[in-house]
Image (cartoon, rainbow, N blue to C red):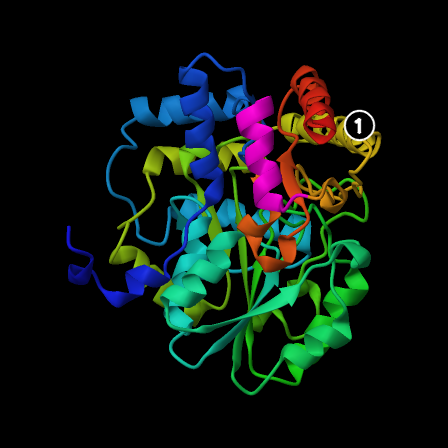
Amino acid sequence: MNESMLAARMGRLGTESAFEVLARARALEAQGRSVVHLEIGEPDFDTPPNVVEAGMKALKDGWTHYGPAQGLPELRSAIADEIARTRGWKPSIDEVLVCPGAKPIMFYMILAMIGPGDEVIYPNPGFPIYESMINFCGGTAVPCPILEENDFSFDLESFRRLVTPKTKLVILNTPSNPTGGVLDRALIEGIAEIARNHTFMILSDEIYGRLIYEGGPLFSITQCEGMRERTVILDGFSKAYAMTGWRLGYGVGPKDLVARMTKLQVNSASCTASFTQMAGIEALRGPQDSVEAMAKTFRARRDRIVAGLNAIPGISCRSPKGAFYVFPNITKTGKTSADFGRHLLDNHGVAALGGTAFGKYGEGHLRFSYANSMENIDEALRRVAAAVAG
């Protein structure tokens, strides 16, 4: 197809390099190469059996037809109860939107709010789709540096200087992808104080909120005075319940904005699959043992990979407080993030992501997902050490 036939906005749309690296890794495996996969942010656990059973029962019981665009009332009620349990306040079901995955929430909110001339402050390094969607909608992407020297958080005064009269939206992510950093309560309360003196909205990406190892439990900006009316929470089932393939997420926010985001869903996905929503009800209301066991396992893996990376000359790694990623510093290897990532995959069979895949402030780092077995983590560490040595 001739590129001139495409709308100009398509040139502003980015991607997730994790899937590109996965494709390269699979191609190497097809040639008989051994690859340790630390590139994809996906739990390596199965969906809990009770949730699978609920989904299968829903299929057998006929939950295979269109449902309400905003989501089944039963699931929205369960989500409202979950917000009450974890954030200390209970939304109405009219303030909840269920989507096929959590990513549509950021898509719908940015699409609903941002146009040419609007500024959006977003974490950098951060999930690449933030910047992609801001650019796609014609907004101005304003990076907030997330730096290692700040323990992968950011300085409140630096943030304050980024806010201008054109700031329309601020994106927060805690725990963070790619760094595993957790924003502490004092910082979040400081952001809320700044927000109360301006008119911008908040998109609070809390998808890893059940996976906090230190500094928890999750403190949401919606727990700050006056912020419930100014914030959309993004959350879902992929990470905590190992339900990535089920495509089930949700947003919680002001009723009027949720109604407009629902209209975008009507115009795109129509609705979320009903049988997956029935499984989601069981996930939230059923036993939580699997979530706790998975978090315990991730913490042990974190400790193993952090210690292993810090034992390799030329690499240093802070211990992340949440999610299932480490973001080690590789500057002493003398290679750029992209070059070292390619070297690691092509010559040593470890798939990881260069830090600049998450923004310019990610240079000098790699992202490893430790959502993999201890055996594979140990093998990856051996290969990383060889890659640094050679």
Residue extending furthest toward the top: 32
Residue 335 vs residue 70: left or right? right
- The residue that appears at 47% across and 26% down in the rendered structure is 25
Q: Which residue is mark 1?
A: 308
**In the image, residue 38 lies at what x, y percent?**
59, 30
Per the rendered image, the range of residues in magenta is 335-349
Vertical position of residue 290 compared to residue 233: above or below = above
Measured along the vertical axis of the image, is residue 145 above or below residue 215?
below
Residue situated furthest bottom in the rendering: 165
Tell me which secondary structure the magenta stretch mostly adopts. Answer: helix
Residue type at mark 1 is Gly
Observer-nearest of 24 and 279: 24
Residue at (39% x, 34% y) in the render: 276
Q: Quadrant of residue 199?
A: bottom right
Element on which disc 1 rests: helix
Q: Is residue 377 above or below residue 366?
A: above
x 26%, y 54%: residue? 268
| Residue 328: x %, y % from top left | 73, 41
Comparing 256 with 347, the one in front is 347
Q: Is residue 200 magenta?
A: no
Residue 129, image x, y percentages: 47, 54
Q: How many marks?
A: 1
In this view of the protein, can residue 351 be seen by the observer?
no
- Can you give x and y, in whole percent of width and height, for residue 110 in the image? 43, 66
